[in-house]
Structure formats: C-alpha cells, structure tokens
C-alpha cells in the first residue's frame, strides 16, 4: 500500500498537487484497501485518512490498511470532516458530484478535478493485483468448461446466464455493476451475437447458432474479462470462415503485445488482418482496453491511443466481426504485458461446436 501511495502522489505532483481526495470507491480501495461509502485523503507526507459515516466506520477500520478512520455525517458532513486535513494543501480530487465539488471549491478555491493520478497509478499492476487477476481468469475458464456442458438446443440465453452466475458467485466472483448494461454477462446467440453489447434475452439457442459468451466478472475487487464464441450443431461455411479470421486476428494481436510497443500498433495488427480478409467494415470497436478495478481502464488499445505498453499493464485483446442480423464472433483474453505477453485465459480458442 505504501508503494501505491507513492505512485499516487507522484502523479498528483504532475498536476501541481500535493494531496489527493478520493470519493470513487475504486480509487478509495486502491488508496486504502477499503471499498465502501467514504472519502479518502492522501496527504503529502503519505498519511492516509478515511472519513466515513457511522454505518461504515467499523468495516473501514477492519479492512483499511494503515489508515486513520474518522466518523462524520453523510453528505456535507464528509466534506466538513476532511477540511482540517487539506486546508493548507494543493488538492486534486476525483469528486464527480456537482454539489460536493461546489462545497470543496468554497473552502479550497484551487481544488482541481482530475482522475489522472488515480488511473495512471492503477495502469501498472503490482504482484498482488496480478495474482488476483490470474485467479479470476482461472474461474472464468472453468465457466467456459461449464458452457460446453450446458449449452444445448432450446436453452435460453437468460437460463445460461443464471447457470453461469450461480457458478461464479459460489466462487466469490460477482457482477461488475457496469452501468451500460442491465445484465451481468453478455450471452448472445445467432443474430443477437451481431450486437457487440447485446442484452441477454429469452431467445432459445438453435442449431446453426454462433453463441457469443462474454464473461466480465469481479473477484476480490478486480475484473477479468474474456470472450469465447461457441457453435451449436451444424454451422454454415460462412460462420466457420468468420470464426477462423477472428481467431487468427486475435493471435496476431497477442503476438504484437510486448513492452515498449504502442497500443495503436496492437490495434493495427488485429485490424489490418481482418481488413485484408475484406471484413474490416465489420470490426466496429477497438481491439481492447485496460482492466483492473474497473471494466475499462487505461490504456485503450485503439487506433487513437498514444500510449506505449509498460511491463505489468493488464489489457484485453478482443477483435470481433459482426454480420448484421446474422451472427457475430468475438474472441477475447485478458493479458499481462511482459516481454512475451502473459495470457491469463487457458480455455481453447479453437472453434468448439456443441
């Protein structure tokens, strides 16, 4: 935790700040080890304080690491509690609530809003974080083995989601709470698979379906993200062709991942391969993204990214082809950046036809 706080302050200094105030639970957790309703303060001397309402105080004391814990009323009370700690500091905060930010500005007119120190510190994972991501990915691999056993004609997307989530929760893996979807998973059969972020429906799987199963789940705070596409029964030659193109594109992308290369070059590797096969117009999203305490973190693996990959960044590589109204194929792994990438998922990427 001490090392994390040093990194946080380093990036705060880049913004001419010497203290950080965190309201977002992911950043609070990274800074303190406590995930809950509270405000975290990291002072320039490294001292860390949590200000929490009474209903969270006891848990904050038990779960935080080397933190002072102060009780305050919710809302305005939290702001009042932190003022003595930061009144003489140059403060950077991730506060996204307008009333809270206005209160901060009244007491500290120079306060800056920026998530940059938090996201920059979180880009490179430490050994503890990598160990958690490895375990999360192992559980997801087990869930794909379960897919092979459970997928059958007539099973609904929603039924498979229930089976998988029950399995995950028994192993302490939970939904990410990602706000852009109403479902914990993406399970999309047949034409639904042509929607990269399809909502889970009651559609029944049918012979000839390609079934996209995107498992993005949280284990001990950290998110692992993988996708496999299964076939059911007899597949068309077109479906098989598309699958093999995506599989090879993902392989090329993984081979491009190494320390010191640009994120854009990794995206180019996947995108150029698909374009050469004349399906470039059907690859409609970026090649990947950072993972960690959130589903999407820095860096982005995209055409517009200017980031260079560093050792122990955690990213996804997930090319896809989506044929409107017909089917989609996506293959995705979570990866730790090394001299040779450490692919966290071991479940096969060969086409599995059930």
Image (cartoon, rainbow, N blue to C red):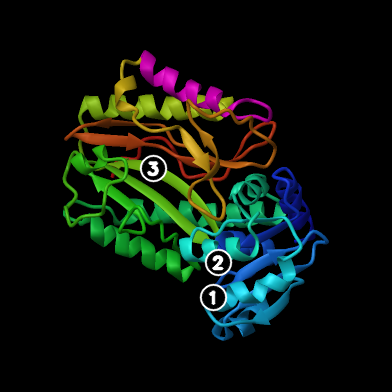
Percent coordinates x, y for residue 105 in the rendering: 59, 60
In-image side of 104 versus 98 (left or right): right
User: Circle 1 sits in a helix, a strand or a loop, which is it?
Assistant: helix
Instruction: Single out the mark in the foreground, 2 or 3.
Output: 2
Which labelled disc corresponds to residue 54? none
Label 1 – label 3 distance at C-alpha: 46 Å
Query: What residue is disc 3 on?
Result: 228
Q: Earlier in the sequence, mark 1 or mark 3?
A: 1
Q: Residue at x 61, y 46 (%)?
A: 116
Q: Looking at the rendering, in which quadrant would you find the C terminus? A: top left
> Mark 3: which secondary structure?
strand
Position in image of residue 139 (x %, y %): 50, 57
In the image, taking residue 144 as reference, residue 261 lies left or right, namely right
> Does 331 sit left or right of 61 as displayed?
left
Task: Tell me the magenta residue range.
Answer: 257-276
Q: Which mark is in front, 2 or 1? A: 2
Q: Position of residue 90 (x, y in %)?
A: 72, 55
Report the residue at 75% width, 57% height from top: 5
How far, Cα to Cα, is label 2 from label 1? 8 Å
116 w.r.t. 222: above or below? above
What residue did someone put label 1 on?
Answer: 76
Residue 199 image position (x, y, % from top left): 26, 52
Q: Nearer the viewer, residue 345 or 65?
A: 65
């Amino acid at each position: 935790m001490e090392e994390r706080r040093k990194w946080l302050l380093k990036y705060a200094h880049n913004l001419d700040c010497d203290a950080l105030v965190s309201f977002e639970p992911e950043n609070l957790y990274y800074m303190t080890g406590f995930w809950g309703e509270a405000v975290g303060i990291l002072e320039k001397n490294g001292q860390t304080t949590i200000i929490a309402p009474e209903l969270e105080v006891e848990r904050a004391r038990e779960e935080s690491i080397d933190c002072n814990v102060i009780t305050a009323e919710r809302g305005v009370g939290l702001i009042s509690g932190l003022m003595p700690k930061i009144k003489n500091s140059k403060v950077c905060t991730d506060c996204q609530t307008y009333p809270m930010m206005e209160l901060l500005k009244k007491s500290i007119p120079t306060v800056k809003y920026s998530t940059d120190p938090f996201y920059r510190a979180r880009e490179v994972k430490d050994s503890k974080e990598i160990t958690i991501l490895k375990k999360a990915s192992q559980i997801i691999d087990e869930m794909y083995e379960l897919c092979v056993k459970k997928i059958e004609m007539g099973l609904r997307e929603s039924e498979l989601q229930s089976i998988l989530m029950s399995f995950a929760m028994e192993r302490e893996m939970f939904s990410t709470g990602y706000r852009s979807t109403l479902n914990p998973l993406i399970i999309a059969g047949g034409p639904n698979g042509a929607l990269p972020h399809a909502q889970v429906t009651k559609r029944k799987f049918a012979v000839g379906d390609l079934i996209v199963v995107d498992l993005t789940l949280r284990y001990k705070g950290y998110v692992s993200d993988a996708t496999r596409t299964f076939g059911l029964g007899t597949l068309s030659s077109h479906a098989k062709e598309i699958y093999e193109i995506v599989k090879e594109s993902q392989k090329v992308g993984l081979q491009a991942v190494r320390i010191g290369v640009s994120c854009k070059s990794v995206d180019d590797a996947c995108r150029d391969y698909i374009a050469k096969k004349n399906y470039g117009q059907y690859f409609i999203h970026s090649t990947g993204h950072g993972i960690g305490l959130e589903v999407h973190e820095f860096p982005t693996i995209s055409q517009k990214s200017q980031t260079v990959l560093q050792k122990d960044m955690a990213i996804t590589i997930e090319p896809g082809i989506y044929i409107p109204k017909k089917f989609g194929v996506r293959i995705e792994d979570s990866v730790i950046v090394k001299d040779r990438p450490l692919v966290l998922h071991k479940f096969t990427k060969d086409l599995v036809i059930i």
